[in-house]
Amino acid sequence: MKFTTSLLLATLAVATPAALLRAQAVPSTISQAAGSEQTVEPIFWPKEGRPKLNVSSFYTDFDGIDVPMIQLQVDSLNVLLSNRKTLRARGSNSYRYSGELTDSRLPGVSLGLSVFKVDEFLPDLSDQSWNAYKAGLAAELPNAEIVLDNSNIGQAITPYVFGEQFRQIVYEQATPKAIVKRREIFAFVNSRLLVFTVSGTKAAVDQNWTSIEHLISEMSRS
C-alpha cells in the first residue's frame, strides 16, 4: 500500500503572491477569458448531488510504528492519507461536493471532494472541454476574476495528484464582506473525474496555498 507520512506537513512553507501567479497570463474576468469560447456549448457544474463521502479510520505499520490513517471513499475511488488530530473529514451540504476536509492548521479554508462519472461532467481534459467549462463559468460568474489557469500537461506544475495529469483554475469574486477565492483542480483517477475545490477568503487561501498543495500531494490511492 502506498503511503506518505504526515511528517512532511511539519515543514510547509507559506506561498508568496509571486508563487501564486507562476502560470500563464490570464484575462481579468471569466467572461473575458471565455472570449473565443463563447461559440462553444458551455459545460456547467452538474446540479445533481454527488455520491456520499464515507470516512473510516485505521492504523498501518510504518517502520514498526502504528500510524493512524484515514480512508475517504467516494463511489469507486478510495483515498488514503495520514489521520492527524487537526484534520476533519465530513459530508457536505452543498450539491457540489461529496464531502469536505478542514484542518485547524489551515484556518478559513475547506477542501471539497467531488467525483463524477465520465458522462456526468467533463468528458476529458482537452482544450475543447476546458474551454467549454470556462464558457459555463463565464455565464454563471461573469464578474469573477481569474488569477490562474494552467495545467501540468507537458510541464511540471504542482500539486501532485496521484501522478495524473490535471488542469486547474483559480478565480476570485468580491462580496460585501470579503473577496472569496476558489481553486478547482480537475484530474481523471480510476476512470472517474475527481475535482478538488479549495474555498475560502482570498487571504486564507493565499496564506495556506502551499500547505494545501502538500495536503493534496500527501493523498494516495488504495
Image (cartoon, rainbow, N blue to C red):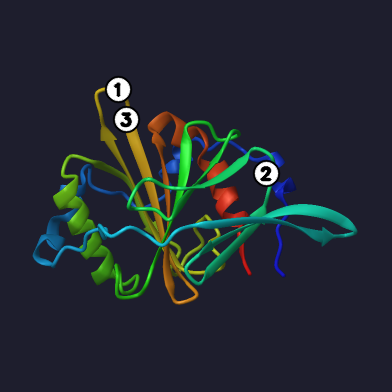
Which one is in front, 10 or 77? 77
Question: Which secondary structure, mark 2?
Answer: helix
Q: In this view, does 117 lie above or below 69?
A: below
Numbered circle sitting on residue 160: none
Q: In this view, does 117 lie above or below 132?
A: below
Which one is in front, 68 or 14? 68
Question: Which secondary structure, mark 1?
Answer: loop
Q: Which residue occupies 69% across, 44% down? A: 84
Q: What residue type is labelled 2?
A: Leu
Q: What residue type is labelled 1?
A: Lys
Q: Which residue lies under the disc numbered 3?
A: 179
Q: Are marks 2 and 3 in contact (CB under 8 Å)?
A: no
Question: Which secondary structure, mark 3?
Answer: strand
The spot of residue 155 in percent (x, y) is 47, 65
Q: In which quarter of the image is the C terminus?
A: bottom right
Q: In which quarter of the image is the N terminus?
A: bottom right
Q: In which quarter of the image is residue 171?
A: top left
Label 2 and label 3: CA atoms lie apart by 27 Å
Q: Which residue lies under the disc numbered 2?
A: 9
Q: Which residue lies under the disc numbered 1?
A: 177
Q: Which residue occupies 69% across, 39% down? A: 85
Q: Is residue 201 above or below residue 67?
A: above
| Left or right position of 20 against 26 | right
| Residue at the limit of the structure toward the left, as seen here | 39
Which one is in front, 55 or 110? 55
